[in-house]
């Protein structure tokens, strides 16, 4: 069987499976609380796998992923609030109209985040060492300050009125696409160049690899996927607050990939699920929940 035909069949099977599971979730056949946790895990998978592209496979150290997530979330939310409903109605409303509107919002969020990644990455990735960590951390905090002072998106009060789309299909379609894109990048010539940069950047340069170009490209792709994750989060609850994107969120995503293993896609998926489920599983311990959560993280890290 030709490879393209096999991939096409696999894609159809995955889409059919996601659509079937979406029917189960929309039909409330699963407890809404568990449904929420599962969908939040899907969003976390997108964020973790995208960060692993730059931190795990390229060997750079970015700790501002929440900033790019915020850019994608707010830009898509503004589009949905201002133009999404009219676009959906123009297309006749219903499932098709809102699917196109959400698809457009996702593209806008990913594009805005990728442009932010390009602006941040071009000057900082020319340097070596921990400069990227410093720049991305600063970028994330600057974004939060800007969002707190932009009244068009609610400022410090938060941005409400965003169309709510709690779709298992859409959330996990983006997660699957993120995994597929990163997997194909890693197993391509482009991916081998990224891994060579991670292992020894000077040797990669000596072999003719344009390290700055490859690092910037990986960073832009990672930022775009973080923006897509932000789009999903914005439309999941219909409300955004700048506090949700402070540096703690970036560290949370970073812990996911470190826990799962840098340079491991499967590890990123498992780390994202674990760090989403664990705080909820510990709710029964009331005021001791975060203490136990922190201790468990330390134990998992050292083992």
Image: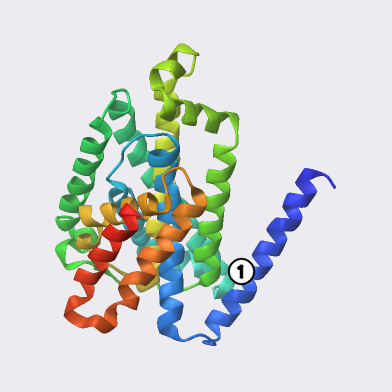
Of 235 and 263, nearer the camera is: 263
Of 246 and 147, nearer the camera is: 246
Q: How would you rate the neighbour count of disc 1 (Cα within 10 Å): few for under 14, some for 14-19, many for 20 or more?
A: some
Residue 170 rendering spot, x and y as whole percentages = 52, 65
Q: Is residue 238 above or below residue 251?
A: below
Residue visible at 28% across and 49% down in the picture: 67
Residue visible at 77% across and 51% down in the picture: 6
> Which residue was labeled with disc 1?
18
Q: Can residue 234 be seen?
A: no
Protein image colouring? rainbow
Q: Is residue 122 left or right of residue 196?
A: left
Residue 244 rendering spot, x and y as whole percentages = 24, 62
Q: Is residue 6 left or right of residue 273?
A: right
Q: Is residue 175 above or below residue 56?
A: below
Residue 269 rendering spot, x and y as whole percentages = 47, 57
Of 267 and 272, nearer the camera is: 267
Q: Secondary structure at mark 1?
A: helix
Residue visible at 37% across and 46% down in the picture: 113
Residue 252 rendering spot, x and y as whole percentages = 29, 57
Of 167 and 61, nearer the camera is: 61
Q: Is residue 233 left or right of residue 130?
A: right
Q: Can residue 149 be seen?
A: yes
Residue visible at 41% across and 74% down in the picture: 37
């Amino acid at each position: 069987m030709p490879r393209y035909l096999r991939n096409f069949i696999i894609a159809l099977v995955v889409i059919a499976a996601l659509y079937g599971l979406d029917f189960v979730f929309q039909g409330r056949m699963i407890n809404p609380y568990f449904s929420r946790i599962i969908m939040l895990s899907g969003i976390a998978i997108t964020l973790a796998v995208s960060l692993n592209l730059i931190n795990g496979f390229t060997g750079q150290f970015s700790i501002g992923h929440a900033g790019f997530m915020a850019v994608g979330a707010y830009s898509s939310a503004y589009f949905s609030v201002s133009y999404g409903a009219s676009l959906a109605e123009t297309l006749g409303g219903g499932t098709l109209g809102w699917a196109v509107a959400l698809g457009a919002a996702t593209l806008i969020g990913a594009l805005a985040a990728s442009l932010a990644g390009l602006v941040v990455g071009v000057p900082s990735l020319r340097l070596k060492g921990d400069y990227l960590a410093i720049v991305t951390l600063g970028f994330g905090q600057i974004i939060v300050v800007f969002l707190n002072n932009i009244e068009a998106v609610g400022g410090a009060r938060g941005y409400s009125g965003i169309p709510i789309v709690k779709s298992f299909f859409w959330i996990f379609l983006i997660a699957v696409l993120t995994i597929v894109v990163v997997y194909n990048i890693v197993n391509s010539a482009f991916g081998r160049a990224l891994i060579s940069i991670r292992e020894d950047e000077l040797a990669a340069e000596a072999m003719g690899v344009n390290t700055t170009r490859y690092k910037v490209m990986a960073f832009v792709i990672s930022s775009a996927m973080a923006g897509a994750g932000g789009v999903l989060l914005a439309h999941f609850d219909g409300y955004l607050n700048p506090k949700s994107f402070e540096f703690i969120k970036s560290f949370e995503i970073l812990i996911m990939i470190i826990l799962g293993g840098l340079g491991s896609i499967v590890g990123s998926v498992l780390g994202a699920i674990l760090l989403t489920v664990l705080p909820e599983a510990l709710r029964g311990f009331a005021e001791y929940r975060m203490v136990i959560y922190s201790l468990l993280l330390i134990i998992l890290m050292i083992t």
